[in-house]
Amino acid sequence: MTINVKNLVPAYAIHPGEMLKDELDARDIKQNDFAKLIGYKATQLNEIIKGKRDVNADFALLIGKALGMDPSFWMGLQTQHDLDKVRIEEKNKDRVEAIGIWEMMNPYIAIKYLKKTGWVSGDPIEDIPKIKVLYNVGSIEEFPALYANGRFRKSTKLETDTLNLVAWTKIVAYKANNIEVKKFNHNKQEELIIKLKEILKENKKTLFKVESLLNEYGIKLIIEERPDKCPIDAYSFWSNGKPAIGITLRHKRIDNFAFNLLHELGHVFLHLTNDNTVDFIDYENDNQKYKNSSEEKQANEFASNHLIDAKVWALFKNDEIDLTDSIIKQFAKQQNIHPAIVLGRLGHELNLYPKTAITKELN
């Protein structure tokens, strides 16, 4: 990045009196002697040296002659000092204004989280424009509307930091905005899910392969670590005319990742394709109205039924068989899924946790 030196503002304005003192010291000339030489009182010279009095044309002419220097040099120093002083005052004025704006922004932004992730530096002059871009607001007055959505109300059961939650969604949206993917075609839903299940079953370089696959089908995927006190799993929304999904990997297991991903794909194919103004944020809270909404139930069913056929699952879970690793692996193979996905569903729906050596970790 090229820096324009003319735009730099010094920390303080250097008065020509400082330069004159250095010059006299370098030539071993005492101030009293020099004052007599140029016909000034010692107190007058001292005021100039201490920056209490400015250098005028008469003084510049005298010291120029006495020191064998161009008088315009000293006038130039005075002009530069005056310009720097004005620039510093203007800069301070801007900083005072920025501090005031920053204080008004504080209640609406997750400062610690944004500092931790490198989105803000702590300098309000630098940070305010970044925050406005990140949160997609033009003024402070627009911030309260970001939290008006009922999904962001404080939970009574879980300690959720709403500021962190909103900041996470904004970071995901910002990153999605800078991702280019192929053309999205909602008619290729089944084709995409078949290929997706193959990747999940193999569970090798899963995140990279899933991201690449979704890219080919016109869907943006953003993996973004969750903030503290923010039990969020995923987020689906429109980004520049393309569906986008953000996932936290809150539980780094293949069954959790598979279900959350399919849940958000449910939102994409069932809801986002019909309404490009909606978004869906899935996190643990006690907002029963949102959790029990038709959209959330439909997304849950979409994920469950596309991972394991509903009728086949009903027969399997009702069979009174010993759930050994071999039985689970055999069933998973028949359904073309990773066996850990079967284990995850047994635990979630039936509260069954068979002793197993099946690896659940997301690779």
Image (cartoon, grey):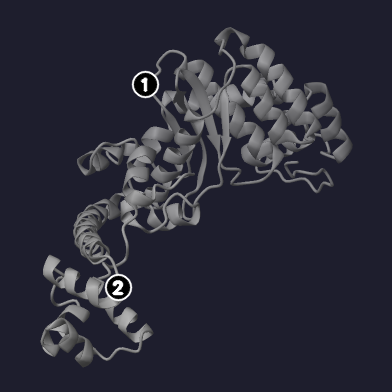
Residue 203, image quadrant: top right
Residue annotated with mark 2 = 68
**Residue 180 position within the rendered picture, expressed as x and y whole percent measured from the top left:** 56, 23
In the rendered image, the quadrant that contains the C terminus is: top right
**74, 216: nearer the viewer:** 74
Question: Is 214 on the left-hand or right-hand side of 39?
Answer: right
Ranked by sequence position, the earlier of labels 1 and 2 is: 2
**Residue 222 position within the rendered picture, expressed as x and y whole percent measured from the top left:** 56, 34
Residue 55, image quadrant: bottom left
Question: Is 127 on the left-hand or right-hand side of 316?
Answer: left
**Residue 95 position within the rendered picture, expressed as x and y whole percent measured from the top left:** 25, 57
Q: Residue extending furthest top?
A: 187
- How crowded pointer 1 is (Cα within 10 Å; few <14, some 14-19, many 20+) is rated as few
Residue annotated with mark 1 = 277
Instruction: Give above or below for 14 relative to 127.
Output: below
- How crowded pointer 2 is (Cα within 10 Å; few <14, some 14-19, many 20+) is rated as few
Q: Which residue is drawn at 21% across and 57% down?
A: 83
**294, 43: nearer the viewer:** 43
- How far apart marks 1 and 2 lie (CA) works out to 75 Å
Res. 111 in view: yes
Query: Mark 2: which amino acid?
Result: Gly
Residue 135, image quadrant: top left
Query: Mark 1: which amino acid?
Result: Thr
